[in-house]
């Protein structure tokens, strides 16, 4: 599923540029993706759109950045894991995510049913959430979203 999400992000600049579900299914199949994986990805994307609408309508006042602290219940903590929660907090502090976007990311991450959530997959979820809202992360955040977490990072002290 995540390969399809990355393919859609790289192929279509905006979600509006995607063809309808039938045509997109045919195109993804022609590219070589399996039908089950296509169905799962399109279903996940459909729920992402629903989440965007639901949070925007239910909490319009939350579009500004929240200064409150998000407490993660045990169920969410177990599914997300400390790396994912730390990354979400980093994105909030960097003002990449507002409170509504954070909740959408959490909701879509929990829908994946993978525990703990691998950081590389969480980054794709964040990227797709921003993409679905017509937002593009700045260059530094974009690099962070596509950083290879499997390679040790070298940090130089100056």
Image (cartoon, grey):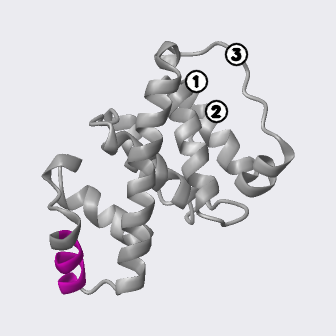
Q: Which type of secondary structure does the marked residue at label 2 adopt?
A: helix
Position of 51 compared to 11: left or right?
Answer: right
- Residue 83 spot, x, y in % from top left: 69, 49
For the point 18% across and 79% down, which residue is it? 26
Task: Give the CA separation, mark 1 to mark 2.
Answer: 6 Å
Residue at (26, 61) in percent of width and height: 8
List the residue tagged with mark 1.
93
The reply to whether callout 1 and callout 2 are in contact (CB within 8 Å) is: yes
Badge 1 element: helix
Q: Quadrant of residue 139?
A: top left
Q: Position of residue 66 (x, y in %)?
A: 60, 15
Percent coordinates x, y for residue 30 in the rendering: 18, 85
- What number is the disc on residue 157? none
Magenta span dominant secondary structure: helix
Residue at left 78%, top 31%? Answer: 71
Q: Is residue 154 visible from the viewing direction of this image?
A: no
- Residue 66 visible? The answer is yes
From the viewer's perspective, tell me whether residue 6 is left or right of residue 144: left
What residue do we see at 26% from left, 87% from top? Answer: 32
- Of callouts 3 and 1, the N-terminal one: 3
Of the numbered discs 2 and 3, the one sitting upstream in the chain is 3
Question: Are the residues tagged 3 and 1 within 8 Å (C-beta)?
Answer: no
Q: Quadrant of residue 136?
A: top left
Q: Is residue 1 or residue 143 the one in the foreground?
A: 1
Q: Which residues are magenta?
A: 24-31
Res 20 quadrant in image: bottom left
In the picture, the quarter occupied by the N terminus is bottom left
* Magenta stretch encompasses residue 7: no
> How far apart, in angstroms, are the residues tagged by discs 2 and 3?
12 Å
Between marks 2 and 3 in the image, the one whose residue lies nearer the viewer = 3
Which residue matches tag 2? 89
Label 3 sits on residue: 68
């Amino acid at each position: 599923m995540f390969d399809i999400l990355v393919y859609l992000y790289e192929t279509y600049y905006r979600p509006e540029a995607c063809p309808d579900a039938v045509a997109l299914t045919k195109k993804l199949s022609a590219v070589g993706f399996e039908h089950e994986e296509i169905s799962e990805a399109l279903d996940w994307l459909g729920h992402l759109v629903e989440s965007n609408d639901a949070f925007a309508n239910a909490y319009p006042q939350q579009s500004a950045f929240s200064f409150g602290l998000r407490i993660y219940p045990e169920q969410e903590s177990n599914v997300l894991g400390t790396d994912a929660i730390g990354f979400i907090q980093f994105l909030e502090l960097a003002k990449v995510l507002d409170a509504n976007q954070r909740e959408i990311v959490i909701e879509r991450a929990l829908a994946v049913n993978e525990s703990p959530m691998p950081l590389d997959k969480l980054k794709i979820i964040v990227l797709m959430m921003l993409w679905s809202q017509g937002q593009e992360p700045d260059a530094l955040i974009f690099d962070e979203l596509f950083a290879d977490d499997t390679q040790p990072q070298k940090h130089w002290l100056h």
